[in-house]
Image: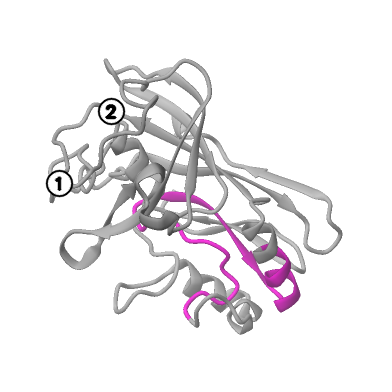
Amino acid sequence: MYEPRVVYESPAFLVLYKPPFMHTVPLGSSGESLFGWCVKRYPGLGRVRGKTDRDGGILHRLDRETRGLVLAALTQEAFENLMRQQEEDRIVKTYGALLVPPLFAPPGFPPLPPGLAGAFPPEGRFCVESAFRAYGPGRKAVRPVAVLSRPGGKGRVYRTTLLAAEQADAPNCIYAKLSLTRGFRHQIRCHMAWLGFPVAGDTVYGAAAPGDTGDAEKPPLALKAQGLSFLDPENGAPREFFIPPLIED
């Protein structure tokens, strides 16, 4: 669980597993990243002109604490194809999360839009969407900006879809299966906290005391990127990849 690995390899792309406690791309002097680990084995990934020099062929990032699947391109052509798919909402990412009652209420959240207040845990599938803004010391956290309250309608809207939910062993805790296409930093963590059910172990959004890193033998954040679906950049065939869900960890 704590080592990166290649889940699937083709001449055009890789599906990678990022363990918890590792950054997706280099951030200062924060130690090894998934990008650095991968470039040692696949130098072509580092030659791709990506979103930044630190990303290379990495298509999307996971938070340091989050584990799961990351998609990466090995050629410029594949990167551009997959980036187009991402912009067109054709790359779908599936997550598993353990949602818990909050330990504390983080400040700065706007009122929930009509129809969402008191709607969680829901019966059946539903969506929560918002724009986002940076928040707090060092702007390290984010807060949702309700779609109806966006000044002038500015800012891209990001949607988190709840696909399924089941009762966990602990009272009032829920195992949730969620999906998104284009993602924003902390999107699922922030959206779930906004609904009043933050991700277990989340010290930023109210599920654990600030500074509590949890048991050293377990990831402190119960969030796992467990599925990816997209079109093969070489032949257009549908591709789907899944790893065991959070509930089986």
Question: Do the residues under discs 1 and 2 have CB atoms within 8 angstroms?
Answer: no
Q: How many marks?
A: 2
Quadrant in the picture for residue 223: top left
Quadrant in the picture for residue 148: top left
- The mark that comes first in sequence, 1 or 2, is 2
* Rendered position, 156 above or below 38: above
**Which residues, given as a range, are shown in magenta?**
54-82
Residue at 75% over, 68% down: 12
Residue at 58% over, 81% down: 46
Residue at 63% over, 80% down: 48
Whole-percent x, y for residue 60 in the image: 53, 61
Whole-percent x, y for residue 29 in the image: 29, 78
Helix, strand or loop at disc 1?
Answer: loop
Residue type indicated by callout 2:
Val
Residue placed under numbered mark 1 in the picture: 212
Whole-percent x, y for residue 5 in the image: 55, 58
* Rendered position, 157 above or below 9: above
Q: Residue furthest front?
A: 152
Residue 100's mark?
2
Q: Is residue 240 visible?
A: yes
Q: Nearer the viewer, residue 155 or 7?
A: 155
Dot 1, how many residues are within 10 Å of its Cα: few (below 14), some (14-19), or many (20+)? few
Q: CA distance from mark 1 to mark 2?
A: 16 Å
Helix, strand or loop at disc 2?
Answer: loop
